[in-house]
Image (cartoon, helix red, strand yellow):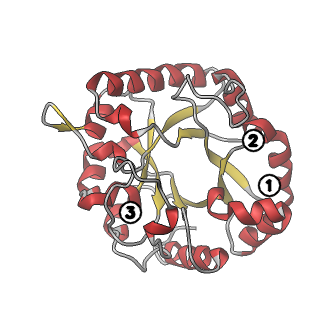
Amino acid sequence: MSTPRMSVQLYSVRHALEADEDAALGRLAALGLRNVEAFGFVHRAAELADALDRHGLSAPTGHAGFLSPERATAEGEPAPTLDETFRAARRLGVEILFDPFVPAARWADETEIARTAGLLNEAAKRAADHGLRVGYHNHSQEFVHTIGGVNAFDRFADLLAPEVALEIDLFWASAGGYDVVSLLGRLGSRVRALHVKDGPVIDDPFTSGAPFDAADTRQVPAGRGEIALDASLAAAPDAEYAIIEFDHYDGDIFEGIATGVAFLNGKGIA
């Protein structure tokens, strides 16, 4: 059993980054963090790499959408190619790149689940040429449906090549009362990162058809909610990263992260 390295998903402080990137990164470093998980970096990898370096931060993991080839950017331009995405990830120093979201409709259909797994397996081959690993980060829509008596996410995992990594978001995997500890046990060494996120056990919002409002998640600092964080950390002995994240937080986000840092420090994770 190895001890994961602590990190924080930069999406948690997105508003602070927009206001003053250097100040926000400085505050994260002052909390004792040395690793971050990047997002939205493909068009500015060199710039972000320089900013992280100024504050003694590294981005060994990152999020980028590469499993939806039909997607376009917000400006209507074609999405970056796989090779463009992977080059940007390596420029930033990313070791494992996770696709953060595949829409809910694709988890209700066995053919679409197989297609998604196939796209990820192919991406893993291409990523290896760049010295990069790839994987998938869950929300809750992956656990709603059953395919041939098997949960959709388990079916997906069974179709993945051995080199594909999984990043389990403990808050989202617990939504709807799903047993995340048992899930981690089944996935075993595939789990290379955890999103250490806490709050109430809510229902899956992504298949309801209603607009998603992150404020409705009522997330709280790690150790203050209902998610089985202790048991989950113990059930993922091969995880390389324990990553603090908030989709939304009603208080001072840096105070929330500081509480998460203290929680993980108390588990011997730094």
Compared with 228, 138 (above or below) is: above
Q: Residues within 10 Å of mark 2 (few under 14, many from 20)?
A: many
Please state the horizontal and vertical placement of residue 201, each as a whole percent of the image. 32, 67
Q: Is residue 160 above or below residue 50?
A: above
Mark before the other along the chain sequence, 1 or 2? 1
**Around disc 1, counting alpha carbons within 10 Å, would you say few (fewer than 14), some (14 to 19), or many (20 or more)?**
many
Question: Which SS class for mark 3?
Answer: helix
Q: Position of residue 121 (x, y in %)?
A: 45, 23
Residue at the spot x=33%, y=28% of the render?
A: 113
Quadrant in the rendering for residue 5:
bottom right
Identify residue type, mark 1. Answer: Leu
Visible residue check, residue 235: no
Number of callouts in the render?
A: 3
Q: Residue at x 72, y 69 (%)?
A: 28
Q: Which mark is residue 92?
A: 2
Which of the numbered marks, if any, corresponds to residue 233? 3
Q: Which residue is mark 1?
A: 52
**First reached walking from the N terminus: tag 3 or tag 2:** 2
Image quadrant containing the N terminus: bottom left
| Residue type (three-letter) at the residue carrying disc 3 | Leu
